[in-house]
Image (cartoon, rainbow, N blue to C red):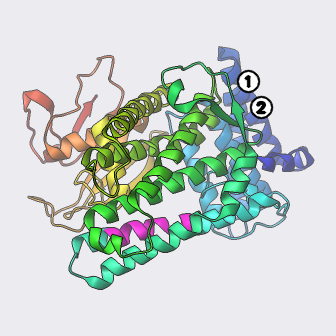
Amino acid sequence: MGDWVTSIPPRIGSSPVVTTAAEFLVHSFDCYAEDSHSNKIQAMQTKSKALRELQLSLLASQKAPTYDLLLATKMHYASEVLLGVTNLHYAIHTLGLMDLLRCGVPSGADEKYFWNILDNTYIDDLSLDDREFIGRAMMHVVVQCPRLTMSIRHAIRNPDDVDAVASAVSHAENLWRLTRQRHFVDYINTSIKTVASYDDNTVADILGHGIDFNLAQEMVIATRYWLLQIFLCGTLDTLLRRFPIQFALSLLPKPAAFHGVDVSAAIQLARVVLALGHNPSPLTLIRTHGPFSGSIGAWHRQVRYLSMTQPDSEDSTGSDTAREEALRTALRMKRWVLDNCNVILTRLHITQVDEAAWMEALDCMAGEELPDWIPTKVSFGAEDGEIIMRLEYSGVTANGDPRVGESSTRVFNVKNPAQFGPQHLREWVKGTGGPVILKGSPEAGCVVETASPHWLCLGAEGASYDSSERVEREF
């Protein structure tokens, strides 16, 4: 879980909010280890008691959050993950922790472990040794990535704007240079350990071995660094395809070079998943899934790059035979990563995502135009004691273009969002089918409510409803 847990024992007994949160964490782990009725009852009882103490502590420290409150919130997050992620209760504590951290350094903070609390809240674990410097240096790059994506998207929409294109290229040059510093590689190489035994031999000839780590924070830093490399390589690929002349005149690496970095990072992330074993902790699955799913983009781009590269071009990877072999490898890995991402989602009892939705989402993360099915705003709320996800569509698309036939805001309230994937939005907005399944079917479980049924494409039946009515369908 990270070094921050060493701050807990000295506070047990003297801090009610930490004591009850620790009890909830212990009983949640018991429930995870043995999913019995008695363990569930005990976990729910301690959860109720811990939540009351958390609320009292929050009310007592509205203007100046305490370190005890941070520790308790972090433990509540871990406890909810162990109990199951489908109800998204853990997300409440993640958002709450972010709000608490925005208030600055809490009173009574344990300076030795405070930065470690940032684990999975912003980017990675930090502590007062080599990890502190590596983590902060990486965070310095990561926080600039959304700006790079937006600058590339702005340049694509304004290709004749020399300043816009130059700004995007210059920003990419700076971030690429920062991520290539030697201290990142040295730290990660000393953190990883090779795992020779694994259960999946499907791509053993490509991966060779698995990867494991001694500490959770080392895994977080390494996987986030590889994800950062993949993200930056995606933006370079977009710049190359959209602005080949400006790319060639820049200080950015050659296409073969950055595609090599892209694939190398994806292989490392695949090795991490290869070494997870039969029954990894839900906390490990949640930490691993994000970077691992992002690596699909690396193989997607490799397939596209090798398919478009001519054998006699400057960027060719060699002979026709070698290029065809590399293409087959990329296709195998892309399918293996997609399949294993969905395995992780299944283990977490979350709906699987189809390939088309993944590819569109990954391309837009690399600076391409946002697809119409991306909501203008996503938020979470509560209804009848359960988490709902609100998807808001304004009269303009996420790119700022007027939405065809619509001038007012439409809002979807999605109950049980763990059973709801981006492919559902994609199908609705594109009008190519509907995800609606009749109530009582095995796939039922996600309820979508909207005051604007025009947005719902209800499958082959082509059913329509009066737009003044409230529509509720299960799928």
Does 207 sit left or right of 414 as displayed? right
Q: Is 149 contained in the magenta span?
A: yes
Task: Tell me which residue sits at (50%, 43%) in the image.
Answer: 266
- Work out whether residue 110 or residue 448 is closer to the camera in this orientation and state it: 110
What's the residue type where badge 1 is placed?
Asp
To which residue does mark 1 refer? 30
Task: Tell me which residue sits at (32%, 63%) in the image.
Answer: 240
Instruction: Determine the secondary structure under disc 2.
Output: helix
Q: Position of residue 133 (x, y in %)?
A: 74, 65
Does 340 sit left or right of 310 as displayed? right
Q: Is 157 contained in the magenta span?
A: no
Query: What label sits on residue 26 in the rendered view?
Result: 2
Instruction: Determine the secondary structure under disc 1.
Output: helix
Query: What label sits on residue 117 in the rendered view?
Result: none
Task: Tell me which residue sits at (31%, 68%) in the image.
Answer: 153
C-alpha distance separating marks 2 and 1: 6 Å
What's the residue type where badge 2 is placed?
Val
Task: Tell me which residue sits at (85%, 50%) in the image.
Answer: 7
Instruction: Name the quadrant of the C terminus.
Output: top left
- Work out whether residue 390 or residue 130 is closer to the camera in this orientation and state it: 130
166 vs 359: above or below: below
Residue 52 visible? The answer is: no
The reply to whether callout 2 and callout 1 are in contact (CB within 8 Å) is: yes
Quarter holding residue 405: bottom left
Residue at the bottom extreme, as displayed = 163
- Magenta-highlighted residues: 141-152
Instruction: Name the quadrant of the N terminus.
Output: top right
Q: Position of residue 456 (x, y in %)?
A: 18, 41
275 vs 233: above or below: above
Quarter holding residue 395: bottom left
Q: Position of residue 469 (x, y in %)?
A: 16, 43
